[in-house]
Amino acid sequence: MNTKEKIVVAALGVYNREGIRTVTTRQIAQEMGISAGNLHYHFKHTEDIIFTIFEQLQRDYDEMVVLFDQKDTTFQELLQEFTEGSYLLINKYKFIFVNFVEICTWIPAIGDAYRTLVARREEQFISLFEHYSKLGMFRQDIPIAILKGFVRQIFIISDFWYSSFAVLGGRFESDALEDYRQTIAVAFYPYLI
Amino acid sequence: MNTKEKIVVAALGVYNREGIRTVTTRQIAQEMGISAGNLHYHFKHTEDIIFTIFEQLQRDYDEMVVLFDQKDTTFQELLQEFTEGSYLLINKYKFIFVNFVEICTWIPAIGDAYRTLVARREEQFISLFEHYSKLGMFRQDIPIAILKGFVRQIFIISDFWYSSFAVLGGRFESDALEDYRQTIAVAFYPYLI
DNA sequence: ACAAAATTAGAACAATTGTTCTAATTTTGT
DNA sequence: ACAAAATTAGAACAATTGTTCTAATTTTGT
């Protein structure tokens, strides 16, 4: 692992632990035992570090989403995969979820990338629901407008569940996964058969 | 309106417009045409301003919640009131919702107050749902665990809807209220009769 | 009317921050 | 083996920030 990669790893760790408000590039450098000058040789601006982390998140997400393509699984299995997969991402990139609005205004390219991603995700989910409707595992009597709203709801919950959990004082990681699983399960509860 | 009150108003405006990341006490002072020294005469620390704004939010919230007590309204009417009332709050105190996790770690007293509020809210909602179950306006076949999860879900949605809306590029206020109304409506959709 | 208290502006302070510059050291390609 | 390129540490810079200090002005209570 070269220095540039190490910086990304260290930055992710520090940001997740302390948030973006108080963390400085000096602190990241110190934490990994290099000079601040060296850090800025690899990343001219702080934004560049955060953008690189976001790109990593996107790659991780795409990797996870590939798993949804085998449509021979039951809906319950798919839901289980979605829950575990998205939890891993949320947990790994906490600080991005927690500071998402701020980051998107600070670094517009991230906001743009997110909006593209969401548009893609939306269609994916809708067609998935329609597929499982036909298989009798998802309610068929839901109007399309509600279905779209439900997808939006799932996005809000998965994007901001961690913020809510953190603010409610959730500390232990074991609790966290269970809490997330329960939250997602409840959201799907009235739509499953 | 005395200077102290004016500072709170100005700060709220600037924070909502530009977020807490880049805004300085100097900027708030300049915006309202007073000196930074004067501002810090009234509020020794920046945290004190934000804490005061949060107290205001709490008072506004309590005022809104009183309206829920007349239980002779239909559930639809109540829902309508909740949607409009909470939207007004969210819109007025945007920056608190957007930076909630950060603010809660920065100013622990705010986190504590929020957790107390949530506990109260939770019971209120549950008993409201039970009341409307008996009146046949809310599904009676929902297990209590799911009901509690549903309340949590409503909290996540109302606390973070604006973050999602902002990040998705929502700009116009007219769109915003409609979007929020729709999001809340969809969440309740499967639970109403 | 006037002394005491409150308010205000603006300079000053001390700390911090992102970033650049310089010179040394290490690595790489041939 | 050696020149060129890449990497590194640390000093230096320039800007900013929250906050304090000082002296003047305004307001308040009697």
Image (spheres, coloured by chain):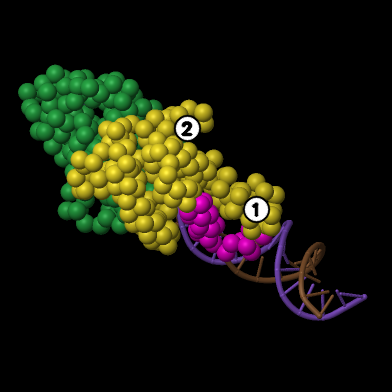
Chain colours: A green, B yellow, C purple, D brown
- Crowding around mark 2 (Cα neighbors within 10 Å: few <14, some 14 to 19, many 20+) is some
Q: Is residue C29 above or below residue A159?
A: above
Quadrant in the picture for residue A190? top left
Q: Can you say which quadrant of the picture contains the N terminus of chain A?
A: top left
How many badges with numbers are in the image? 2
Q: Is residue A90 left or right of residue B124?
A: left
Rendered location of residue A123, percent (x, y): 27, 21
Rendered location of residue B39, percent (x, y): 63, 58
Q: Residue at x 12, y 23 (%)?
A: A136
Towards the viewer: A99 or B158: B158
Rendered location of residue A3, percent (x, y): 26, 44
Q: Is residue B50 visible?
A: no
Rendered location of residue C4, percent (x, y): 76, 79
What residue is shown with label 2?
B177
The three-letter amino acid code for the residue at tag 2 is Leu
Q: Chain of mark 2?
A: B
- Does mark 2 fall on the same chain as mark 1? yes
What residue is shown with label 1?
B6
Towards the viewer: A47 or D29: D29
Q: Residue at x 43, y 41 (%)?
A: B73
Q: Residue at x 65, y 53 (%)?
A: B6
Q: Residue at x 16, y 40 (%)?
A: A84
User: In the rendered structure, which segment of residues is drawn in magenta?
Assistant: B38-63
Q: Main secondary structure of the magenta part?
A: helix
The three-letter amino acid code for the residue at tag 1 is Lys
Which disc is residue A148 wearing? none
Does the stretch in magenta take in A43?
A: no
